[in-house]
Image: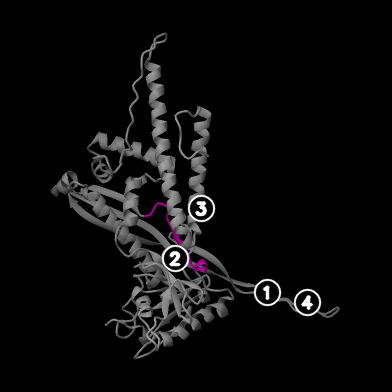
Amino acid sequence: MSSSPSRRMSAREFRAFIEGLGERGEQLAARVQNATPGEVPQLEREFKEWESQAAAAESETERRIKMDEQLRKVPRGTGGPATVTREQSIYSPDERTSFVRDLAFQGSDPAAAERLQRHQREMRDLSSADASAGAFAPPLHLQDEWAEFARASRVYANQVRSTPLGGVGMQVTIPRVTGGTSTSTQSENSQVSETDATTDEITVNVRTIAGQQDLSRQALERSEPGLDRVIFADLAASYAATLDQQVLNGNGSAPNVEGVLQNSNVNSVTYNDADPTVAELYPKIAEAVNLVHAGRLLPPDSIFMHPRRWAFMLKALDTSDRPLVVPSGNGQNQVAATGQPAAEGLVGNLMGLPVFVDPNIPTNLGTGNNEDAIIVSRTADGLLMEESQAPRTRVFESVGSDTLTVRLQVFGYVAYTSQRHSKAHAKITGSGLTDPFA
């Protein structure tokens, strides 16, 4: 497939280009679902390239439509020139039109309603969008800003196996085999081993994550740059952080998810120490790794800890004042290896496993409310179900109409369980994980 659409393409060639672009978008979306941390930068580059090609294709489509319209206006037998103009994307960052303002005023402003409908048609060309009940898919440039907003993101949730949440129901039932069949050696004419498999079901509750802010109509209409970008960026970032916190440590009681740390059936390692050191913590992590091996009979694939715990390991020195965690793993007898500095996400490796730091791991555990936790996990055995368009956006103009107040809202439905294979996870807790910098 050509890297970009050309004006020289025939109608058939251009149609093939659009079809190939759609197929590539679907392939990229599928790859994201199972991407490893090391693949993410390359996928981000490929997505940016795809979005650039999609924008170019949209521009070329508009040009061809307008050219056809102009040509139809030229009387037969004349050679009158046709003037072709190019229309910007409706909610481009360079445009003064605002996605949220149009959502708010679509009832009273026909032009706003018309722009939203055109935007919905654009979004359906690139992805699925739900326009029911006043919910709209946000424009691509707003989605980009959400991803880049500075706040703790969903590190653990992004590593867990993810699948789309069904469109109906407030519970998900997952079958599970709890006891297996059997085989054994058999003598001639003797009874063959026979054991019936036993099963049960896991019931996972669908939970709602939502947030909103009321805003004066004046601020919404007359802010420059649009205040909608700031507010919805923060609401979406808060949504992501709340989802990650729930998957990690939700207590399971309505309206909360049951997080992996609250699953009483996961492997547990206690590290109590009044004067903790990396040398004493290291065997505890090895014990957690072994518990996953023994309980799941498959290896874990990741280690998660709070940034302060990784920093605790980074500052540790041996008896010759040499760091125990060194860059790139080139040292001798090092405990772990560190990669590029990061406030969250992949930071290095330990015992052959990638280490992720997640600021949403709680730091108020234990009797003193000052302990964090370390999680060793086979992330493919967890299951996170969420809507493909989450978080959805809504704007309500009528709730504060007597004071010219507009309500901006985001929401989404999620379900998570670590109980498919509880022994695929191990948590390390105890007084040895208090704040190392206090």
Q: Secondary structure at mark 1?
A: loop
Mark 2 = which residue?
Answer: 416
User: Of marks 3 and 4, which one's residue comes earlier in the chain?
Assistant: 3
User: Of marks 2 and 3, which one's residue comes earlier in the chain?
Assistant: 3
Is there a contact, CB below 8 Å, between mark 2 and mark 1?
no
Dot 4 crowding, Cα within 10 Å, few <14, some 14–19, many 20+: few
Q: Is residue 328 left or right of residue 139?
A: right
Mark 3 = which residue?
Answer: 30
User: Of marks 2 and 1, which one's residue comes earlier in the chain?
Assistant: 1
Q: Is residue 127 visible?
A: no
Per the rendered image, the range of residues in magenta is 379-390
Q: Is residue 270 visible?
A: yes
Q: Secondary structure at mark 2?
A: strand
Label 2 – label 1 distance at C-alpha: 29 Å
The residue closer to the viewer here, 282 or 73, is 282
Mark 4 = which residue?
Answer: 192
Q: Position of residue 366 (x, y in %)?
A: 34, 83
| Residue type pointed to by label 2 | Tyr
Q: Secondary structure at mark 3?
A: helix
Q: Is residue 87 above or below residue 371?
A: above
Quarter in which the C terminus is drawn: bottom left
Q: Is residue 409 left or right of residue 15?
A: left
Q: Secondary structure at mark 4?
A: loop
381 is within the stretch colored magenta: yes
Q: Position of residue 408 (x, y in %)?
A: 25, 52
Dot 3 crowding, Cα within 10 Å, few <14, some 14–19, many 20+: few
The tally of labels here is 4
Q: Which mark is residue 181?
A: 1
The part of the image, by quadrant, that contains residue 276 is bottom left
